[in-house]
Amino acid sequence: MTTRRNFLGYAATAIGALPFAGTALAQTATASSEPAAKAASGAAAPAASGYDASTASAEIDVISLPALKDDFEAAVPKAGYVFVTGAKGDEWTLRENRRAMEDFRIMTHRLTGVSPQNLDLSVEILGQKLPFPFFVAPMGAHRMIHEEGEVATARGAGMAGTLYCSSGASNMTLEQIAEATAGPKWFQLYFNQDVNVTKSLLRRAKNVGYSAIVLTADALGPGMPDQFRAMGVPFRSDMSFGNHDPARGGSGDFMAQKADLTPDDIKMIKDETGLPVIVKGILRPEDVDPIIAAGADAIQVSNHGGRQIDGVPGAISALPLVARAVDGRVPVIMDSGIRRGIDVIRALSMGATCVAVGRPVMYGLGVGGAPGVKSVLETLAAELRSDMLLTGARSVADLDPSYISVTGPSAEMQKEA
């Protein structure tokens, strides 16, 4: 039986700071979820709040990560489904993250001697050895999906043996999340206007074992799909940003985020924690040098899954020139649009050290809780293993641009590189 906890609602001041200020924060009507399907997946009775988030806890048979989206829709309230699957504006960037994958074709090698026995999917990044070259991207508000929230997601990542990146917009506290996973963990920071709030978050993260800080450069709050706003912004009334909840040791207003970030903020984080800093949200190669000069230990190519600004390129399209600008000085991470093992190969071949996986992990959380998250990650690993064997690379370290043919709009970028 899943343990349930009640939380404070979002503060009126937080909602007022958002671009949809003035919209009522309405209670969500329970989605037309299927009780029989929930019972079959181990679901318990609806939460006391009446929101009826998933309480499933079972491994799931994943045919593919994209196909799991339909099961996810049936397993969670409509508000949660819309919040996770939607994106900003007309959702062009959301679609482009997937479409742009088609611009990069895999050029396979043959007779390379690779076999299942000598295939190596492991990767090391910032002192962490991962069993496969992907981890769980930072995502917030998991209690819109599952009653255990980020605790279940982190536990599932630990069960799969990979890294969990905890979002600063989590419903559970960073301490609860850290305790839930036996695997490595990073903390994603939303830099607060109040430097004392930021420093408090950093100290807390270091004290409970987060091994790196991800500085969010591509967001100023929760992504708000138009359909979610049209529903009345139906966040749960019993849900709060856990890291800022004074009842749980937090302080400050999550929505009071610092917009005017500079490279000096990287130095502050490093001075405060002594931990590696990853800067997330880079799309332009010109941004790389000042960020690395300020002490960044990794660059994360990301458009936040299309949730924050519409009309920017797919992350995979931006990756080659950003990786070229980095030139091996620090690791490169990519997120936004990863759905298949072949997508991972594309990213690694074009300079990424590893990738982060977002929405499909939430699908697994909704359908199966922590074991469902594990199932998603293991399914992607199995697909990657098969694709690597047929690509002809013995290890992820062997992947390089020779494995890629660019035939779409990014061909000019490949020529320049």
Image: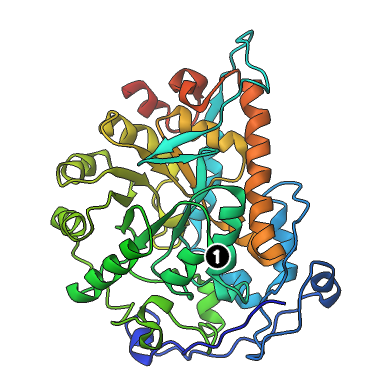
Please name whichever residue, 390 or 31, is drawn nearer the observer in this view of the structure. 390
Q: Is residue 37 above or below residue 17?
A: above
Q: Residue at x 33, y 58 (%)?
A: 218
Residue under the image location 47 percent in, 27 percent down: 349
The residue indicated by pointer 1 is: 86
Q: Nearer the viewer, residue 133 or 414?
A: 133
Q: Could you tell me residue 63's position as x and y percent?
A: 76, 47
27 w.r.t. 138: above or below: below
Which picture quadrant has residue 28?
bottom right
Q: How is the image coloured?
A: rainbow
Asked whether residue 85 appears in the rendered view, the answer is no
In which quadrant is the C terminus drawn?
A: top left
| Vertical placement of residue 106 versus 102, above or below | above
* Position of the N terminus by quadrant: bottom right
Percent x, y of residue 61: 78, 52
Q: Judge left or right: residue 301 versus residue 360.
A: left
Q: Look at 55% across and 88% down and name the residue there.
A: 6
Q: Amino acid at mark 1?
A: Gly
Percent across and percent down for residue 374 are 65, 53
